[in-house]
Amino acid sequence: MIELWRSVNPRGRAVIALALVILLALPSVADRYVLSVLTLIFYFAYVGQAWNLMMGYAGQLSLGHALYVGVGGYVAALLWLKLGIGPWLGVFAAMAVGSAFGAVIGWLGFRFGIAGVYFALLTIAFAEFTRIGFDHLELTGGAAGLFLPFEEKRMGEWWNLRGGQLLFYYLALALASGATLVVALMARSRLGYRWCAVREDETAARALGIDAFAVKMAAVLISSAMTAIGGVFYAFYYNNLFPSQVFEMSRSIELILAPIVGGIGTVFGPVIGAFVLTPLGEGLIALTEHFGLNAPGVKAVVYGVILIVIIYAMPTGVWPRLAGLFGLKDRAR
Amino acid sequence: MWSIYLGVVIQGVLTGLVYGLMALGLSVIFGVVRVVNFAHGEFAVVAMYATYVLFTAFRLDPLLALLPLAAVFFVVGYALQAALINPFVGRPEHEQFILLVGVGIIIVNMLLIGFGPDARPVNLSYGFDSYEIGPLLIDKPRVFAAAAAIAVAAALFWFFRRTRTGAAIRACADNLVGAAVVGLNVKRLYALTFGLGLACVGAAGALLVTIADPSPSLGPAYTLIAFVIVIIGGMGSMAGALVGGVLIGVSEALAGFLFAPSMKSMFSFALLIAVLVLRPQGLMGQRP
């Protein structure tokens, strides 16, 4: 880890340190709204990093990551509601179940040579299949949803993740920074280099003796387990789970926008992407309200146009451009 | 008892043929341009709304609205490919994905602004008529829609098999470098192909109003259905798209009848997973 820190150039170190100090100190001055937006940014940075590992590094396009969010959230919520097992323990079960789903998808996909768009469709199919399954599952309340009790007297039970905005702000910050650190470490590990080799040219990678199947499976397992943790956060932050909301394909899309806009296959891309897109969405809401354009679609139309413009102007993402501009690019990407 | 099942299956086949026409557009686009049109279902819903408007304003029958809609959608597709999508040909899938997802988001929300979230039914005068064949009752509009879908698909088959332009487009799909070497204008042919793909969608959209009432939320669902069909049938195989459409239509109808209508697409996805694993090139596709 010390070696990793050394590989960042001095200007980069200063920016990282400054950003962390500001974000840690911010709750003492910022209001609830700002904190809630930042919490959302951290959440998207976190799940974006999880997706980034699989797509950006191992080159496997998943368009069904909402599956892992939903499964993780449901497992932890059910364990707490039915058995009284708190989320700090439940998260391990969530990770296990999430990565079990990932293992099935990965095994089917990689064992049978399903790649590219076909693999992406396989991930969507599993997510949709699970969504409809949960719609009809009695145990989880079906389409009517699962609710986590939110009582005043239990506020502050941090061991059950019952708390105010502040708790979730710091939790999300820890998740996002932790995931970024994990990605940075993985990118420089043996496995990380193997991922990149498989991503760039799988045949060549196999000729060099890399077990492509094992390497890709590792990517899916790690990514799905990480995403499931995001699901636990989602469940306890929003206190409700609806199959039609958590498993929806638009959720999977939402989750991959930040890393793509920020720049996939880079350590800071997903973070920057989340910092660009989430405030953009919030700003658009504020702006359309300000001008009295209360039609529900206006915000989304502008959002769609901006997406097209970004992917047109900066197909490799915002971060590589930014990093070059400010001289922040470190040697390990 | 068997007649009830037979009726359900026939209903499924008729619906499936219309789905198949929609998926045919996707298959043609992917097979030639190699761009994944993730806004496919959204375009179909635009065509459904256009049919609704033509019907309420001019009493134009969907079966007749099909022709002008196909023409307009051809032009839209041509322009879209030439102006927006061409730079993305050959680029990584996720970049194409974001581009077309952006297009899809814009379409769905424009419809939401224009028409609101509620479904807008097209009430045909013969909407509840049906043919009686022995114990079977078959919906008249669906028979017409299926027949029209077959006609449009046949026209497209003819175009690809019997015209020089069709052959040129097939050449682009088979060997891009070779096609460019013999002097084919690949960019123009790609735009033409995208136009043809969207013409299928325009026609299919006009027919879809006999199956479902247009609402903005149908867009993503139809995109998924089209993808499932194309993969089951085999990407790039035109006959496969129709076969896949019929399979999905029947599977949806049977699942809706035997279990619950809300569970019908679960079986489509199960079918997709099975096909991907057992025969990844699709039922009628060739091994790459």
Image: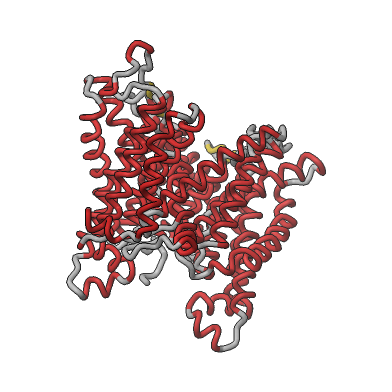
Q: Residue A304, how many percent across, how many down? A: 59, 49
- The answer to whether A191 appears left or right of B114 in the picture is left
Q: Residue at x 25, y 65 (%)?
A: A193
Q: Is residue B214 visible?
A: no
- Residue A281, compared with residue A149, is above or below; it is below
Q: Residue at x 56, y 88 (%)?
A: B182
Give the image's coloring scheme.
secondary structure
- Comparing A282 with B265, the one in front is A282
Residue with the most extreme right position: B58
- Comparing A279 with A231, the one in front is A279
- Comparing B201 with A308, the one in front is A308
Q: Is residue A146 visible?
A: yes
Q: Residue B36, how many percent across, how many down? A: 50, 60
- Residue B182, compared with residue A57, is above or below; it is below
- Residue A248, compared with residue A16, is above or below; it is above
- The answer to whether A46 appears left or right of A98 in the picture is right
Residue A101 image-quadrant placement: top left
Q: Residue at x 21, y 34 (%)?
A: A93
- Count of numbered tags: 0
Q: Residue A67, how many percent across, how many down? A: 36, 41
- Comparing B72 with B187, the one in front is B187
Residue B183 image-quadrant placement: bottom right
- The answer to whether B104 appears left or right of A288 in the picture is left
- The answer to whether B244 appears left or right of B216 in the picture is left
Q: Residue at x 28, y 68 (%)?
A: A197
Q: Residue A77, how many percent across, how many down? A: 30, 26
- Residue A68, compared with residue B288, is above or below; it is above
Report the quarter where the C terminus of chain A lies: bottom left
